[in-house]
């Protein structure tokens, strides 16, 4: 028996998983239209390589990965590309993104594809194959798997398969493990081979006894030395860093990756798609998604990527009082603005919501510093302090109190007796800090450009003055007898003197107050400088005709 | 539809329910209080409740805050009850009103209302009263069974509201100094602790009757722990330090220093340990901070009781430690996940 460890905090919300595990996974019927986003993964969006009107086959590449962190996008079925256009997608920003609209022809005609002999292939080749198969982390982060299989110099001691699925309501991983355990285990063997990992642990929360049994059976059948570990059910025990802590006792240092401590972690569904990609040559075209909540038929469906949410909702038969939908779980899910948006690689669950199911939170009261949030925080933060700093816009204090170690799991909001939307405050503070960082970079550029411009003006002025002096000198030498009474000359001298004075003043005042400033003050100064430069420019251009 | 964002589910805990549970936990103590000292305490609690709610509503109106939204959080009620339990039950009505109004208006709302007051409002109220009206703050009732004149409820009410005592009865005949106060005065008269504690006003552990009230608060406190309204840190550290300090003095000189259990069951020790120091707003948020805060309060309580001139030390110990809360919290930050072993 493996000794398990603990992380601090965590909560025990009602899991509500039984509703959607009564029926086995069903294949969703072919929708009449697929909307396939070109960005279904973390990193650069894939580049469209098909045009409207093109006929595509099932599994055909339609989006080419671009840049180092990216992944391929495929046609989930055969049919005709109706459009390549910007469409609404499920994203916290609410911003639309580029999608291909595919009208299926109903033939499900595959593009030729073949298994990869992974034992006799170079790991780099396998990674490229996974990248071109569009395999990304299906636990929610949708990070391209090929990148995670390139650990650099670090030796991977432990490969963890994450089957914890700690969010209430969601059961897609549970059902996948119950029904397709052998494939998951084979996928794990491939991952283990590519990473040259020393051991493989499969962590499953103990509220899924059937999945645990199925996985144990599959491991035993495979003869592989993998270990299925039942971990205590506690939210957010499925968060990678928390699961690593529970299974190994190791803590991923803040700002570091699991590979830095010799651990790599993949979701069980990712392992399954790695298996499909290598053993069958099938790119990632579908995934298991739970439809649950205020529905008649809570169930898991294997859904083609790009299927509109409304098609899945129809399969679940949402009850009449349903008035909104969540993508993901009740703790970290995203409210959907519309059901016309497509399901993508990151979609694991759709919850139909009515006021009865999730009653709206009562209006917030002030924080009474009861520190229930601190007791619940799995990252050992002091949420009430972070809330205070976010509210009073003391962002540097918030950063000092490790704001960016917050994983936004929502445990603090869940326990808050004042019903303060804490996570939203942290998201606000994080985005403000990030935006400020961008502003500062822009200001730095502006300042550099401005300084160079000033330098150039100075240099030109000086050169002009020198030329003028040389000409005068030449004129003097030519007519030494006649004293200069040209009023333009005295005028010119006055101007020169004024320029020299101005320059001295500038030199005297410049270095004084540009030291020992905070980053914010620097940014403000840069902004003012940039504005001043702009005015300067305007004045200069107004001056232009009178010169020369 | 209103605000709709994650998490979409929450624990059915509310500030109002938490405060209500704390009020409930006070009931055993209050019941024993009324049993041993007569029902006057119920009158002063009622008076304090009405004043607290009235002042809270007025202040919310003045501050343009939604009155019902905040009034229903029960926090003002709790402040009123705690103050009423800290002052003599036979205190004149205006003392209760002035004290409670001060707690709510000055100590709470002028600092920004719920969640923003640095000092425990009830203890501020107590401090103001004991400094401004020391005479009225000594009208403690004698417990039943001491052979003293025991005014009935109507007579108690008459005294509270119009200051009238039954004919031929003086105030001295119905009130007594508290057990802690008596101990202190008698020790100054060179009596030994052993001699003093043989006086009829003392019971098995501490004051006759008041020890039972303390027991009631201990019971309520255990309920708060079981219901997870409070954590063990503050009561354990406070009572532990009080016990240890009293124990050291007692072992060194039992004739001059009462036993630790006497301190536990005298005055506001139990009320302080479970109901006053545990006020989340005015105590540290970190576990380590709570231990330091409560240990400091335990030590100060003992020192003020034994060496100071006030009858009990809990209120001033609380206020003094309240001052230190931001500092304690700042210096007891637990290491963040993934940052352990780093400064």
Image (cartoon, rainbow, N blue to C red):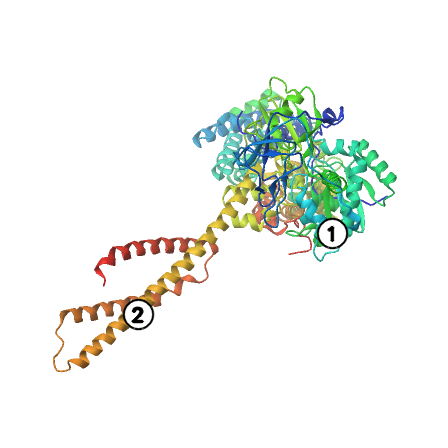
Could you tell me which chain the residue with mark 1 belongs to? A
The residue where tag 2 is placed is: A462
Above or below A503: residue A221 = above
Q: Sequence-wise, which precedes: disc 2 or disc 1?
A: 1
Mark pair 2, 1: CA separation = 63 Å
Name the residue at 20% across, 69% down: A492
Snapshot quadrant of residue B343: bottom right
Could you tell me which chain the residue with mark 2 belongs to? A
Q: Which mark is residue B88?
A: none
Q: Secondary structure at mark 2?
A: helix
Question: Is residue A459 found left or right of B202 in the rendered image?
Answer: left
- Return the residue nearer the eye: A79 or A96: A79
- Return the residue nearer the eye: B150 or B99: B99
Q: Which quarter of the rendering shows the C terminus of chain A?
A: bottom left
Neighbor class of circle 1 (other Cα within 10 Å; few <14, some 14-19, many 20+) is some
Question: Is residue B212 found left or right of A502 in the rendered image?
Answer: right
The residue where tag 1 is placed is: A123
Query: Whole-percent x and y of residue A533?
Result: 34, 56
Above or below A157: residue A54 = above
């Amino acid at each position: 028996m493996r000794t398990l460890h603990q992380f601090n905090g965590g909560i025990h919300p009602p899991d509500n998983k039984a509703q959607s595990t009564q029926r086995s996974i069903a294949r969703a019927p072919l929708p009449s239209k697929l909307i396939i986003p070109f960005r279904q993964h973390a990193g650069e969006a894939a580049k469209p390589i098909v045009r409207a009107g093109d006929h595509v086959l099932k599994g055909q590449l339609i989006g080419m990965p671009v840049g180092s962190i990216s992944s391929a996008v495929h046609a989930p079925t055969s049919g005709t590309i109706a459009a390549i256009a910007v469409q609404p997608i499920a994203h916290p920003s609410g911003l639309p993104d580029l999608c291909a609209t595919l009208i299926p022809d109903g033939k499900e005609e595959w593009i030729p594809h073949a298994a990869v002999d992974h034992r006799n292939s170079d790991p780099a080749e396998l990674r490229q194959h996974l990248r071109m198969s569009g395999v990304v982390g299906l636990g929610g982060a949708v990070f391209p798997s090929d990148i995670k299989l390139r650990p650099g110099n670090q030796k991977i001691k432990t490969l963890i398969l994450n089957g914890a699925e700690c969010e209430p309501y969601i059961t897609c991983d549970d059902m996948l493990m119950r029904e397709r355990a052998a494939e998951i285990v084979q996928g794990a063997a491939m991952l283990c081979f590519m990473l040259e990992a020393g051991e493989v642990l499969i962590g499953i929360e103990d509220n899924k006894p059937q999945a645990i049994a199925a996985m144990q059976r599959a491991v035993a059948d495979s003869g592989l030395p993998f270990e299925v570990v039942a971990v205590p059910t506690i939210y957010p025990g499925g968060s990678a860093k928390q699961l690593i802590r529970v299974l190994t006792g190791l803590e991923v240092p803040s700002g570091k990756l699991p590979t830095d401590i010799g651990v790599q972690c993949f979701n069980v569904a990712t392992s399954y798609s790695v298996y499909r990609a290598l053993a069958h040559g099938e790119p990632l075209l579908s995934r298991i998604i739970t439809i649950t909540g205020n529905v008649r038929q809570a169930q898991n469906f294997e859904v083609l990527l790009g299927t509109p949410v409304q098609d899945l909702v129809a399969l679940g038969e949402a009850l009449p009082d349903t008035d909104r939908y969540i993508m993901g779980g009740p703790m970290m899910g995203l409210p959907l603005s519309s059901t016309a948006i497509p399901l993508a690689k990151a979609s694991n669950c759709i919850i139909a919501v009515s006021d009865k199911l999730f009653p709206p939170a009562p209006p917030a009261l002030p924080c009474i510093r009861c520190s229930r949030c601190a007791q619940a925080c799995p990252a050992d933060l002091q949420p009430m302090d972070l809330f205070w700093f976010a509210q009073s816009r003391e962002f540097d204090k918030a950063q000092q109190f490790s704001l960016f170690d917050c994983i936004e799991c929502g445990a603090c909001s869940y326990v808050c007796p004042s019903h303060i939307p804490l996570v939203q405050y942290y998201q606000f503070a994080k985005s403000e800090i990030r935006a400020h960082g961008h502003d500062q970079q822009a200001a730095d550029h502006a300042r550099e450009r401005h300084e160079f411009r000033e330098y150039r003006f100075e240099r030109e002025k000086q050169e002009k003055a020198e030329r003028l002096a040389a000409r005068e000198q030449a004129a003097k030498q030519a007519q030494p007898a006649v004293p200069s009474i040209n009023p333009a000359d005295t005028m010119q001298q006055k101007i020169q003197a004024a320029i020299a004075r101005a320059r001295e003043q500038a030199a005297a005042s410049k270095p004084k107050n540009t030291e020992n400033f905070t980053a914010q003050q620097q940014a403000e100064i840069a902004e003012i400088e940039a504005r001043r430069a702009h005015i300067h420019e305007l004045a200069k251009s107004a001056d232009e005709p009178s010169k020369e | 539809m209103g605000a709709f964002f994650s998490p979409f589910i929450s624990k059915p805990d509310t500030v109002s329910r938490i405060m209500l549970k704390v009020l409930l936990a006070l009931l055993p103590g209050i019941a024993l209080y009324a049993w041993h000292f007569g029902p006057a305490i119920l009158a002063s609690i009622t008076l304090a409740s009405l004043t607290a709610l009235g002042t809270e509503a007025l202040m919310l109106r003045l501050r343009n805050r939604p009155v019902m939204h905040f009034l229903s959080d029960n926090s003002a009620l709790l402040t009123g009850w705690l103050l009423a339990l800290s002052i003599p039950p036979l205190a004149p009505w205006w003392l209760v009103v002035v004290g409670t109004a001060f707690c709510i208006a000055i100590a709470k709302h002028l600092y920004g209302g719920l969640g923003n007051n640095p000092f425990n409002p009830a203890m501020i109220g107590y401090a103001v009263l004991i400094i401004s009206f020391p005479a009225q703050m000594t009208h403690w009732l004698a417990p039943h069974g001491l052979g003293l004149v025991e005014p009935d409820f109507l007579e108690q009410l008459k005294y509270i509201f119009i200051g009238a005592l039954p004919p031929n009865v003086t105030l001295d005949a119905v009130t007594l100094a508290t057990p802690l106060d008596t101990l202190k005065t008698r020790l100054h008269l060179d009596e030994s602790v052993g001699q003093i504690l043989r006086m009829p006003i003392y019971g098995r552990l501490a004051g006759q009757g008041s020890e039972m009230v303390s027991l009631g608060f201990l019971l309520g406190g255990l309920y708060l722990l079981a219901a997870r309204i409070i954590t063990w840190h503050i009561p354990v550290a406070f009572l532990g330090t009080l016990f240890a300090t009293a124990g050291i003095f007692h072992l060194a000189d039992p004739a001059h220093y009462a036993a630790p259990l006497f301190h536990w069951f005298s005055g506001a020790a139990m009320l302080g340990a479970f109901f006053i120091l545990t006020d989340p707003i005015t105590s540290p948020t970190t576990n380590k901070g709570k231990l330091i805060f409560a240990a400091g309060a335990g030590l100060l309580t003992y020192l003020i009781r034994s060496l100071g001139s006030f009858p009990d030390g809990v209120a001033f110990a609380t206020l003094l430690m309240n001052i230190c809360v931001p500092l304690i919290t700042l210096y007891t930050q637990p290491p963040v996940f993934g940052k352990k072993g780093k400064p």
